Amino acid sequence: MIKHRGFPSRLAGTDFQFTIRRANAKGATPIVRRDRYADRRPADRAADAAFLAALIEHFGSAPFARGNLDAGRLSWLFGREVLPAEDPFDPRDYDARLVVDIDAARAAFPEIFEGEAGP
């Protein structure tokens, strides 16, 4: 399992986890698309935004391996802002490749792009 050095392990001051320490001996937790409803707590939305901002800061629009990124946190973005970068995609593989859809990220979380120059 690839460990993404320098990636924040959690949202500062919270228990919202962004990375895992070690691979699960029983296999990777699958990444699944989770529905985000309008009535989600502000803290949950802030965690999504911070995680997505960290993904963009570390990887930009380039494909990256899932590695030690938390499956639960990825699942909140999967299928919208974070997409499979390979076909076939194995949601239970630590080596599965993902990519951030910058346009979808900008539409869903405009606050993480504030102050950015350009269109």
Image (tube, helix red, strand yellow):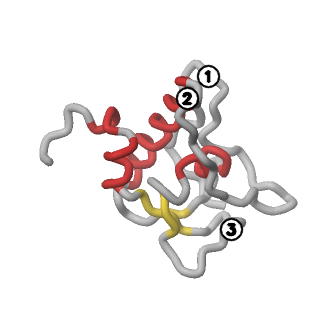
> Which numbered disc flags the more N-terminal residue, 1 or 3?
1
Sequence-first tag of 2 and 3 = 2
Image location of residue 56, percent across then percent down = 38, 48
In the image, what residue type sits under mark 1? Thr
Q: Mark number for residue 111?
A: none
Q: Which mark is residue 93?
A: 3
Q: Secondary structure at mark 3?
A: loop
Residue that mark 2 sits on = 11
* Residue to which mark 1 is pinned: 14
Q: Can residue 69 be spotted in the picture?
A: no
Q: Position of residue 75 (x, y in %)?
A: 62, 51
- Going by the image, does 107 lie left or right of 119? right
Real-space Cα separation, disc 1 to disc 3, in angstroms? 27 Å
Q: Position of residue 119 (x, y in %)?
A: 14, 48
Q: Residue at x 51, y 76 (%)?
A: 86
Separation of marks 2 and 3 at Cα, in angstroms: 24 Å
Query: Is 110 located above or below residue 86 in the figure?
Result: above
| Type of amino acid under label 3 | Asp
| Residue at the bottom extreme, as displayed | 88
Report the side of 85 relative to 1 (left or right).
Answer: left
Q: CA distance from mark 1 to mark 2?
A: 6 Å
Three-letter code for the amino acid on which mark 2 is drawn: Leu
At a point 49% along the width and 63% down the height, the residue shown is 83
* Quarter of the picture holding the N terminus: bottom right
Q: Is residue 23 left or right of residue 42?
A: right
- Dot 2: element: loop
Q: Residue at x 67, y 46 (%)?
A: 72
